[in-house]
Image (tube, grey):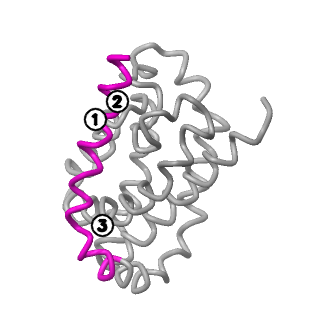
Amino acid sequence: MVDDLFLIIFYVATVVPTLLLVKETKPRLHNLVKGVRSLVYLPITIGILMAYVIFAMDFFSTIPVLNWSWLGYNIALGPSADQGLFGVLPFLPMLVYMLIHVNYFEEMYFRKNVLLTVAWAFLHVAMGVAVHVALALLPLGFLYKYIYRKKGLDHAYALHFATNMIIVAVSIAAYFVPF
């Protein structure tokens, strides 16, 4: 009961700030459209994630310090994501809305240098993911940084957002695949 209340409070604390950005939604959608050409790099980001899942995730999950997570899943999926598909579905619209804004600011602030890119990856631990997942995000962060430097914010943002939408879609689809 107390754990559930904490998760709800933590989720609200991460979501409410994005609600203050409602007037910025239309400009963010325009930013996505402006950066759409960089989706040509989407197979690279998805390939990196697939390689990690297929070849490295099981191994890194066996190393206690790398498998540490305060929650066991990403709180962005909602405070009830551990309850299965119906614990996630009610939070999907808010997740998409939140990613529209959060991904923009992540690209704006965390692609300026290598140290900030590393900090970005490890900030995901605060969202509940395991340390080894943060390590897997490093190559993605460096790719986003490269695109940010070569093509600009809108392009890095569009690729980051598209990658996250694929991750969300695969996460939802995983509930339908029997293991």
Say if 108 sits above or below 77 in the image: below
Q: Amino acid at mark 2?
A: Leu
Instruction: Let me know if residue 163 is in the magenta part.
Output: no
Tell me which corner region of the image, top left, top right, bottom left or bottom right, holds residue 23.
Answer: bottom left
Numbered circle sitting on residue 7: 2
- Nearer mark to the viewer, of 1 and 3: 1
Q: Amino acid at mark 3?
A: Tyr
Q: Amino acid at mark 1?
A: Phe
Where in the figure is residue 122, as x and y percent of width and height? 30, 38
Residue at left 20%, top 48%? Answer: 115
N-term mark: 3 or 2: 2
> Are discs 1 and 2 less than 8 Å apart at CB?
yes
Q: Is residue 105 left or right of residue 72?
A: left
Number of other residues with Cα within 10 Å of mark 3, as a class: few under 14, some 14 to 19, many 20 or more: many
Quadrant (top left/top right/bottom left/bottom right) for the C terminus: top right
Q: Which residue is mark 1?
A: 10
Q: Which residue is mark 3?
A: 104
Q: Nearer the viewer, residue 3 or 140?
A: 3
